[in-house]
Image (cartoon, rainbow, N blue to C red):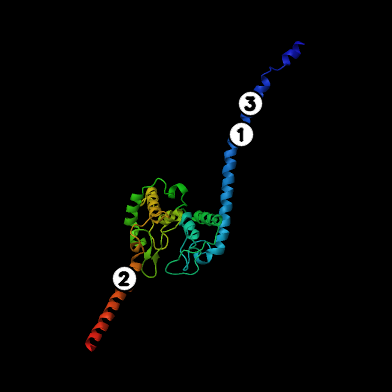
Amino acid sequence: MKKLSARRRHPLAALVVLLLALAATGGLYAAFAPADKAQADETAQSLTIEEGKKLYAVGCASCHGTGAQGTTDGPSLVGVGSAAVDFQVGTGRMPAQQPGAQVPKKKVIYTQAEIDQLAAYISSLGAGPVVPTKNQYSPEGADIAKGGELFRTNCAQCHNFTGKGGALTHGKFAPSLEGVDPKHIYEAMQTGPQNMPSFPDTTLSEQNKKDIIAYLDAVNGDDTESPGGLELGGLGPVSEGLFAWVFGLGGLIGIAVWLAARTAKAKKS
């Protein structure tokens, strides 16, 4: 009887064993779960890049080369970054229908998921500007007045002071910024598409870009009022010049014809 009593376990022994088992399980999870998650993320990224490579081979390689090294029909895409792909493809400028002085915005033919895959593949070829987060391009909390000052200093020479766009040389043009997605405006400042210079964070900080986006949203928003009526000054130099020629010169010609007719009638009488 004494031997059986000696072998009998303490009532708390089972609880201690259970706690030790749970601790060991938790330790194993802590040791292996992060590695499993990292491996899963890496696998998913590899699949995204692979799908992007397939899309690139079909829609882009004919102009930019099989390895994105560039050809006579298209520049190299190595190092342009995911932001450039998201802008060019997300605005329909790429794939381009044909070479020209400037590729215009057109209907987007890829889904956002496919654009992300293309961007992942191009980004894997070389580091470059990345697609911004919503917090980076959201106009919330921005300084609109500062954005207007920055826009007039750095952008108005081409895009007009309210972003209506304007003509450039040799068939090129600065497109209108009215109704453009804030993300694409941010990416354009990052990457410098078409004939536009790039404005990296060393030139225009992230906050500066937010301020500019907020200014454009303020002057071109649906709730914006124009106390001056017809926004002739916001249409650009070409439109203003055309207005002056058609109505100004046309009015002068009309007055000259009227005066000539009156003079001739006066001489007859």
Image position of 63 (left or right of 223): right
Mark earlier in primary sequence (2, 3): 3
Q: Real-space Cα distance between discs 3 and 1?
A: 12 Å
Quarter occupied by residue 180? bottom left
Q: Which mark is residue 244?
A: 2
Give the amino acid type for the residue marked by disc 2 in the picture. Ala
Q: Which amino acid does label 1 sit on?
A: Leu
State the residue in front, 21 or 263.
Answer: 263
Give me the disc on residue 28: 1
Residue at image point 27% right, 83% down = 261
Q: Can residue 165 be seen in this view?
A: yes
Badge 2 crowding class, 10 Å Cα cut-off, few under 14, some 14 to 19, many 20 or more, is few
On residue 77, which mark appears? none
Dot 1: what SS? helix
Residue bearing mark 3: 20
The image quarter containing residue 102 is bottom left
SS at circle 2: helix
> Which of the marked residues, 3 or 1, is nearer the chain's N terminus?
3
Q: Which mark is in front, 1 or 2?
A: 2
Residue 118 coordinates in the image, percent (x, y): 53, 57
